[in-house]
Amino acid sequence: METVAMAPIKLTENAVNEIKRLMADASFVQGQVLRVGVKGGGCSGMSYVLGFDAVEADDEQFEIEGVPVIVKKSHGIYLFGMEIEHEDGLNARGFVFRNPNATSTCGCGSSFAV
């Protein structure tokens, strides 16, 4: 599968560093790449998908700051312009999704409505 030039999402420097750290871990399954997507569910209607997975036929592939990323073609409309950050503070730790397409989000930030 070819790599598409323009990624629909942005990974911040902190997110890139954390993803690369996870990929360097001995338990990481070689050949998998970062999947970013959406699925139905969550308190606001849709939830984000973020994890490592194998490339499938209907995926678009991107490379963002050295991180291989896949997105289902049908998910791009929900993700275009989204920024993924990784926070490592005392009050919050984990990945944060900033999606300009979301009309509302839940309190935990992991689900949204469009």
Image (spheres, grey):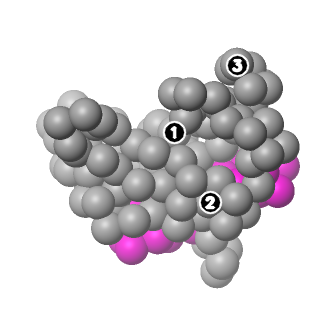
- Residue 31 belongs to magenta span: no
Q: Secondary structure under badge 3?
A: loop
Q: Is residue 63 magenta?
A: yes
Identify residue type, mark 1: Leu
Residue 74 percent location from the top left of the image:
84, 49
> What residue is disc 2 on?
82
Q: Give the range drawn in magenta.
A: 62-79
Asked if residue 41 is positioned above or below residue 58 in the image, the reply reads above
Q: What residue type is labelled 3?
A: Cys
Quadrant hosting residue 46: top right
Secondary element under disc 2, as helix, strand or loop, is strand
| Side (left or right) of 63 relative to 55 | left
**Residue 80 seen anywhere in this rendered image of the structure:** yes
Residue at mark 1: 50
Quadrant location, the C terminus: top right
Tell me the quarter of the image containing the N terminus: bottom right
Q: How crowded is mark 3: few (under 14 residues within 10 Å), some or many (20 or more)?
A: some
- The earlier-in-sequence mark between 1 and 3 is 3
In this figure, which residue is indicated by the disc labeled 3? 43
For image coordinates 70% across by 59% down, the residue present is: 100
Q: Which element is circle 1 on?
A: strand
Q: Please tell me which of labels 3 and 2 falls first in the chain.
A: 3
Up/down of 80 relative to 18, above or below: below
Q: Where is residue 101 in the image (x, y as percent from the top left)?
A: 76, 55
Q: Which residue is rendered at x = 30% and y = 47% of the image?
A: 87
